Amino acid sequence: MEPETKSVIVVANQTATAPELVDALRGLAGTEPTRFTLIVPGTPHDDGRVPAEQRLDEALAELRAHGLTIDGHVGCHDPVVAVSDEWSRGGHDQVVVSTLPLRSSKWLPGGLPERVAQITGAPVTHVVAQPVVAG
């Protein structure tokens, strides 16, 4: 009998290709079958940053290059709503929230990791990563 595949939601934006996140996901995958779903929250307006679709495509390619089984999509601009929408589809086991450090993060002052844990009731791993600068 094959082991059941673990399903993990990952919510990230500027840190979606950060080495800290890659390492955390590889660690979670370990040796058991694991499927990740990356959610990149959309931006409600053009703020000069990399568009969410482009960031998603780059992140999926990078994470797959590290041997991870991952798909993803652009979600609601509110990361809590984005995770809640994905969680409601069912079948997920845990969530990874990847943020910038507190001094730079727009997500941490609002308690994103704690709020995600409250709405899902699932284990939440919080990864703090430096922003990845596009080359």
Image: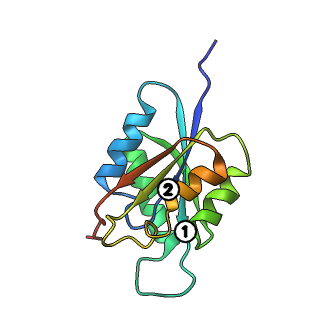
Seen in the image, is 94 located left or right of residue 96?
right
Disc 1 and disc 2 in contact, CB within 8 angstroms: no
User: Where in the figure is residue 69, as x and y percent of width and height?
Assistant: 50, 40
Give me the residue at 29% from left, 51% from top.
Answer: 19
Q: Which residue is mark 2?
A: 113
Vertical side of 70 occupied by 12: above or below: below
Which residue is under mark 1? 41
- State the image coordinates of residue 95 (x, y, percent, origin top left): 54, 47
Compute the Cα span from label 1 to label 2: 15 Å
Left or right of residue 34, residue 59 in this image: left
Give residue 25's mark.
none
Q: Amino acid at mark 1?
A: Pro
- The crowd level at tag 2 (other Cα within 10 Å; few <14, some 14-19, many 20+) is many
* Quadrant of the image containing the C terminus: bottom left
Q: Nearer the viewer, mark 1 or mark 2?
A: 2
Residue plotted at (36% across, 57% down): 17
Q: Position of residue 124 (x, y in %)?
A: 51, 46
Report helix, strand or loop for mark 2: helix
**Quadrant the N terminus occupies:** top right
Q: Is residue 59 above or below residue 76?
A: above
The residue nearer to you, when weighing 52 against 96, is 96
Q: Which secondary structure lies at badge 1?
A: strand
Q: Quadrant of residue 39?
A: bottom right
